Image (cartoon, helix red, strand yellow):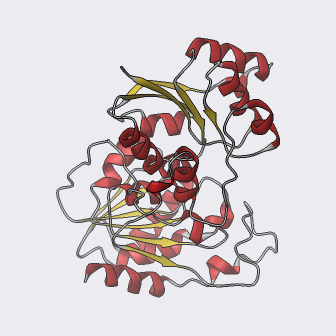
Amino acid sequence: MNTNILIILPNWLGDAIMTTPAIELLANEYPNARFTFVGSFVSIEALKHHPRCEKAVVDETKKSSNRLIATYKLAKKLGSFNLAITFRNQVHSSLLLRFTNTVICIARQSWHSMFLLSHTPNISTNQHLVKQYAELAMSDNSDFKNDIPALKLYIKPIKHQKPTLGINAGATYGSAKRWYPDKFAEVAAAFHDKYDIIIFGGPNEVEMANEIETHLKSKNVHNYTNLAGKTDIKELCANIAGCSLFVTNDSGPMHIAAAYQVPTVAIFGSTKHKETSQWKNEKSIIVRHEMDCSPCMKRECPLGHHDCMKGITALEVIKAVKSLEI
């Protein structure tokens, strides 16, 4: 008999990918598990390929004129489950679980989850987000803690014709997380004789990618492909998965690379590297500068100088990439 499990995914692509070890733990805990995923468009597009996924639903209740009623209607459409978990710490996700009439509902402890749901463990935030998600999913089983698996995506990698260096200058959350296009171009140019270059980016990062392209042309580098704004989530994952090396900001694509064990240099500034760095990637290097004001966790630099990123040189990142080649 199947164990039907409802999982409410985080909205951000990177956060959704960081739930995958927790999902694998659930799949091992319940051998007959069948998952229903509910989440943002990007999170669903990344995770709907899981072999145990029976249904994947994009949550569009936020667009409704009355989100409460829309949440209720979605819950009734989904039906009840043997187990329901939300990885969001948000009142409407707690309501969604409650409205399904599922008996066992799990969410991080908060005023709304404690009021609405059956299981609300108090999860420490002073640990990697992967650990937080795993602890939430396995709140009734403490044996998992020393054996949390790596990130896992089920999208087949593309085999690039030549060794390929991926460049990702974007970070959806905000400009404070972003290193600079000219510096990314300088790194790419340093390796163009050994690797083809792919420039990645979302629909809102095309201008940034085009700036990298302009800098590469000025350096007489022509063996690149600019995919910014030209891939869906499946294609993004497949192309990153096929890279030989990856240079990126703290972002969703950084976690895609980790899921495929792509050797990665990750550049951190405003965010908490101990909580959102690549999880269990055997070849992963973080480049960051310790500053009194970081990590500020702001979308834009609140002090206006952005020194946490401006201070990082292309040479530092080039050295880090070379160390991964050894």
- Residue 246 placement: quadrant: bottom left
- 204 with respect to 257 (left or right): right
**In front of the other: 43 or 175:** 43
**Which residue does the image show at 56% across and 52% down from the upper left?**
135
- Across and down, in percent, residue 63 comes to 71, 25
Task: Say if residue 96 shows up in the picture.
Answer: yes
Quadrant position of the C terminus in the picture: bottom left
**Which residue does the image show at 82% across and 41% down from the upper left?**
111
- Across and down, in percent, residue 78 comes to 56, 16
**Which residue does the image show at 20% across and 52% down from the upper left?**
159
- Residue 244 placement: quadrant: bottom left
Tell me how many marks there are: 0
- 190 with respect to 117 (left or right): left
**In front of the other: 126 or 153:** 126
Above or below, 322 against 10 in this view is below
**In front of the other: 104 or 97:** 104
Quadrant position of the N terminus in the picture: top left
- Across and down, in percent, residue 88 comes to 65, 42
- 53 with respect to 82 (left or right): left
Task: Say if residue 205 shows up in the picture.
Answer: no
- Across and down, in percent, residue 102 comes to 61, 22
